[in-house]
């Protein structure tokens, strides 16, 4: 008995705009205004991950995760850079 191939219905997927925005913000934060854009990227990435979690049609979880990691790294490095800069200024007096 032959089994006919039935078409598989694929769910439509929608790219998550917030994940793209978060990744763009994180990448720009590497080069300028890291103290502002790093936390913004973290916030946008968490929002995007929550949206993707609640709507299975949204894609971009990897982008949101990358934005979260980059945002954290940018924020930490910027804060450490500021601490080092102020420590150097304070020791020169």
Image (tube, grey):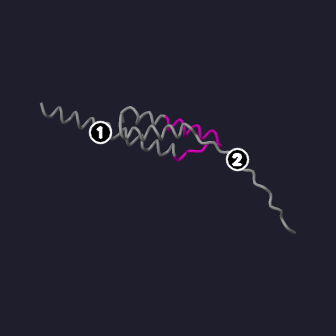
**Residue 93 image position (x, y, % from top left):** 12, 30
Please report the residue visible at 28 percent of the width from the left and 38 percent of the height from the top: 81
List the single residue furthest toward the right. 1
Q: Which stretch appears magenta?
A: 44-62
State the residue in front, 84 or 15. 15
Q: Would you say 19 lies left or right of 93 here?
A: right
31 is higher (above) or lower (below) than 2: above
Q: Could you tell me what secondary structure mostly forms the magenta stretch?
A: helix
Secondary structure at badge 1 equals: helix
**Residue 32 image position (x, y, % from top left):** 35, 36
9 is higher (above) or lower (below) than 39: below
Q: Residues within 10 Å of mark 2 (few under 14, many from 20)?
A: few
Please report the residue visible at 37 percent of the width from the left and 38 percent of the height from the top: 75
State the residue in front, 5 or 65. 5
Q: Give the residue at mark 1.
A: 80
Q: Is residue 61 magenta?
A: yes
Q: Is residue 7 magenta?
A: no
List the single residue furthest toward the left. 93
Q: CA distance from mark 1 to mark 2?
A: 45 Å
Q: Give the residue at mark 2.
A: 11
Please report the residue visible at 50 percent of the width from the left and 37 percent of the height from the top: 21
Q: Quadrant of residue 77?
A: top left
Q: Would you say 72 lies left or right of 4 here?
A: left
Q: Would you say 41 lies left or right of 16 here?
A: left
Q: Which mark is residue 35?
A: none
Q: Quadrant of the N terminus?
A: bottom right
Q: Would you say 15 lies left or right of 37 here?
A: right
Q: Quadrant of residue 79?
A: top left
Q: Are marks 1 and 2 in contact (CB under 8 Å)?
A: no
């Amino acid at each position: 008995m032959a089994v006919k191939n039935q078409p598989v219905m694929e769910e439509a997927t929608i790219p998550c705009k917030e994940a793209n925005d978060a990744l763009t913000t994180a990448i720009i934060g590497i080069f300028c205004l890291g103290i502002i854009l790093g936390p913004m990227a973290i916030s946008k990435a968490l929002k995007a991950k929550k949206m993707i979690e609640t709507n299975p049609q949204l894609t971009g979880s990897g982008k949101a995760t990358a934005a979260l990691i980059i945002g954290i790294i940018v924020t930490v490095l910027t804060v450490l850079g500021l601490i080092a800069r102020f420590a150097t200024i304070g020791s020169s007096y």
